[in-house]
Image (cartoon, rainbow, N blue to C red):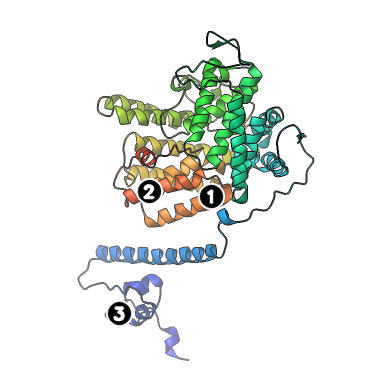
Amino acid sequence: MSNNKFLKRSKTGCITCKIRKKRCDENKPICGDCKRLKKNCVWAKPGMSLQQIREIKKKVELDEEKIKLKKKIDLLKKKNNNHTPFQQRQIPKPKFDFTPLYHLPSNLFDVCPIGMRLYDYFRDKLAKIICISPQSNNYYLSIFLPMAHSDPGVLYSIIAWSAFHLGGTYEDLGHSYLKKALDHIKNNPLISNNDDDDDDINYNNQSVNGKPRSLNEKDFLIRLSNYLILCGALICDGDVKLWRTCLEYGSKLIKYQGGFLKLIYSSSIQKNWLALNFHYHDIASTERGTFFPSEYREPLFNFDDNFSTLTIQSHNLMGIDPLHGCCQPLYHVISEINALALKCKRLMRQLLNQIMDKSFEILNKIDNLVPNFSDLEKLDKKELELQLTLFEVFQFTSKIHLKQSVLRLNSSCIEIQFLVSDLLKRLDIILETSVEGSLCFPLFIAGMNCTRELDRNLMLKRFNDLIDRYRCKNVPRIKMIMEKVWSLDYNGSKNIDWYDVVKKVGWELSFA
């Protein structure tokens, strides 16, 4: 038997072959294997310390990882090139074989057959995608759909939302129904176009001294619902301006009805849901602050003396909120952080001490917040784990957001990287689950703070996979802002103000 069969790897071979666990022929300056594979042949020099050799070995290992990752990315690109991009793909008509939950008389409003199918698509698929709670709490179905049967504006907005979500050949039809919804609102005004008088509401073309006699509650609920559905549809279409205008008109309605707190503390489930829906979109805005900052600071969420339990006093909705999940208190905290970040930009020098005190107060609040366990009692084990992991995701997101946007820490500092590492572990658990629809902001915050090329490539893959599954066009725009931040800070050593990045491109971006 040949002795070559028992030859062991050389202990004095090149470092590259040792990393690859291959036998080295020890030819210098380039060994045979490295020359054949066109690899960087690295040798330990005489007199090098053990520590120096270890550092060289780590560098070679990192280079090998980059080469492997590049091969995987090239393979993925090759596979993707064999498929038609989603935007150019001909999307088949939605198929529905079900017993209708609601009968929508087609002769009631001007809706084409495809529009009817888009309405069905919203009911049977889109509304369930948007809702991150168990379907028993899906108020998109139980509150918005019945309104579509009595108001064409709501119906047209729902159809437009479905068309934008499907994309492709449906987008033109979506814009057609969006125009119909806006025309309906324009032709049936509840609020005048006089920007100087927010309270001048026209009702049945009757007013007294420029003020309305009354505003019918049904009209108020339907019109506010219409504005909120339009917000969702426009955000899904990738709009960066008009959705905020719809929200602004919704705020005028709320002010005339007595303000946000009157809605949130109302005994009406419809009003509670609309208030929370408005709050969700309001705090998701990147600029200008919120419409009801003082009312959002009210104690909507009550704690015991030890911060060990949380009771939601704000509404009568039963179970998990379809938009916030169990993260309602953390959304409230994000609203505070957004307001504080904008304040920090204006008054950095004068109010530095106050901002620092407030920041540490918020950090303490984040650490002590807990979900409303009464909402979680009826969840099965899988749903419970998803909701609790989602809560932790928003905890880490809130901390990173505060430390970066307010305390101005850069991405490469150890404190931020430690938090990002914990956040990414939890994001990977709940991506591709029923709660991933609320992960736009956490993904952006985590991605923006990735500093290594390897981590950034993995984050791009997470975004691309989410875009393929979720289809809302605000997600690619969020990804574009993240990549712009990377281009301005290639190694994470700077603190990039991403608010300014959004402002420079002229967008009003939503993370909803």
For the residue pair 383 and 150, the one nearer the viewer reads as 150
Residue occupying the far left of the picture: 47
For the residue pair 400 and 51, the one nearer the viewer reads as 400
Kind of element beneath mark 3: loop
Left or right position of 96 against 247: right
For the residue pair 220 and 293, the one nearer the viewer reads as 220
**Rounded to the nearest whole Å, what is the CA distance between mark 2 and mark 3?**
41 Å
**Rounded to the nearest whole Å, what is the CA distance between mark 2 and mark 1?**
18 Å
Label 2 vs 1, first from the N-terminus: 1
The mark lying in front, picked from 2 and 3, is: 2
Q: Pointer 1: what residue?
A: 467
Label 1 close to label 3 by CB (< 8 Å):
no
Residue occupying the far top of the picture: 209
Q: Three-letter amino acid code at disc 3? A: Ile
Q: Pointer 3: what residue?
A: 30
Residue 488 percent coordinates (x, y)? 32, 48
User: How many numbered callouts?
Assistant: 3
For the residue pair 488 and 59, the one nearer the viewer reads as 488
81 in relation to 472, above or below: below
Left or right position of 317 against 106: left
The label on residue 484 is 2
Kind of element beneath mark 1: helix
> Which residue is pictured at 51% across the width and 18% down the height?
255
381 in relation to 337, above or below: below
